[in-house]
Image (cartoon, rainbow, N blue to C red):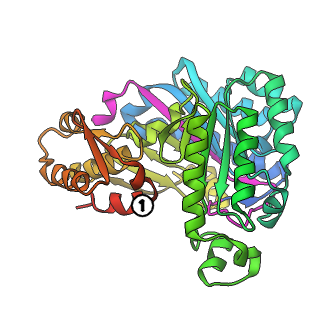
Amino acid sequence: MNSLASPTLGFYVQIPFCASKCSFCNFSSQVERSAAVYDSYLRGLEAEVAQLSRQAGDVALLTVDSIYLGGGTPSLFGAPRLARLFSVLRARFTFAERCEATIEITPNSADDALLAALLPLGFDRLSIGAQSFDDRELRSVGRLHTARDIHAQVAAARRAGFGNISLDLLAGLPYQSEASWQRSIQQALRLRPEHLSVYLFEADEKSRLGREVRRSGSAYHADAVPSDDFMADAYQTARHDLTAAGYAQYEISNFALPGYASLHNRKYWQMKPYLGMGAGAHSFDGTRRWSNLVEPKAYVEKLAQGLSPTADCRSLPAFERAEEFFFLGLRQREGVRLDHARRLFAGLSLDPWERRLRDLASEGWLKERDGAFSLTDSALLVSNEIFERLLL
């Protein structure tokens, strides 16, 4: 099994609860602050942990070297529940002595007491959903924090001892301008996080704001969303400023100071094994992908009945795994190597992908160096179109 070529495993835990639902959010999260609901969901997670070794097979025997709690806002779960979850995981699985453990928080969602409790639990990395340092932009999409709160949250995390902090920024928010975007970047850089993610707003049907933009409406401030050209320029501005400040772009949307690239996220792009837990979580063992029921109540009810929460599971034939290898790998600035692909997919002809890679290189979308293909700078903004050309 290809996954066993990797000696380590990643965990993703979905905590799909928020204090508010942002208009741009296209994730399967819900507004919930009920302790009873949180406790019920935790019991579901504990029950799923007990099932994972059967579902995952040999992969469950690998050493865990990364765990990522996403959402939602996992910090709302509170330290006692997080401690209980970690205790159950450590009792069932083998953890590396050095395990990258990330938890997503929003400004104001992690007070001093929680931050002080997270480090002893093993969390060594915070991912903070800043999105913007402009208060009008934040209000327009329903964020509950201000720019001042972002600064205060980072300061509190530093006082607690966190030396690995990531900030998210989102280009394309309503009322965003070239000047406000530049200010957001500069304020983020002033905080000197070890990691920065820069995303572009996507107008899709899964978010209220996205649906309104697609129908050219004005609700949720959709008529104040900047143009695609603005977002393209904003992305290039961020790339320039972050690179100049010493951050290396290691993936299309991710930048890090030396030594701080996300170990967990790289597992996704490098097709390393990871197990997902929680409503809507996804897993990959090297040959199979499976996902859980999305709705938290249905997820919990299944597990309470002693049943699996898996909604779908499929084995990927070798050619599909090869497709994923190329388009996921090209998300990374280091790109993909043909010799690595040949070792992973021995017995499968890679000629169709090699031809397409060389065609894309001749057109200026990829560059080739020592057998490695990677996106050129001009290809970053049209990467999805390039990836589509790698699909057979």
> What is the x, y in percent for residue 8?
43, 26
Label 1 element class: helix
Does residue 171 appear in this view? yes
Q: Is residue 160 above or below residue 142?
A: above
Horizontal arrangement in the rendering, residue 316 relative to residue 46 (left or right): left
Quarter assignment of residue 152: top right
> What is the x, y in percent for residue 348?
14, 46
Where does the C terminus fall, quadrant-wise? bottom left
Residue situated in front as seen by the camera: 287 or 338: 338
Residue pointed to by mark 1 = 382
Residue 7 lies within the magenta run: yes
Quarter assignment of residue 189: top right
Residue situated in front as seen by the camera: 144 or 260: 260
Horizontal arrangement in the rendering, residue 27 relative to residue 345 (left or right): right
Q: Residue at x 72, y 60 (%)?
A: 30
Where does the N terminus fall, quadrant-wise? top left
Residue situated in front as seen by the camera: 17 or 170: 170
> What is the x, y in percent for residue 255?
56, 38
**Marker count (numbered):** 1
Q: Residue at x 73, y 34 (%)?
A: 82
Does residue 277 appear in this view? no
Residue 107 lies within the magenta run: no
- Give the residues in magenta: 1-28
Question: How crowded is the residue under tag 1: few (<14 C-alpha within 10 Å), some, or many (20+)?
Answer: few
Residue situated in front as seen by the camera: 36 or 254: 254
> What is the x, y in percent for residue 232?
54, 61
Q: Residue at x 76, y 75 (%)?
A: 221
Amino acid residing under circle 1: Val
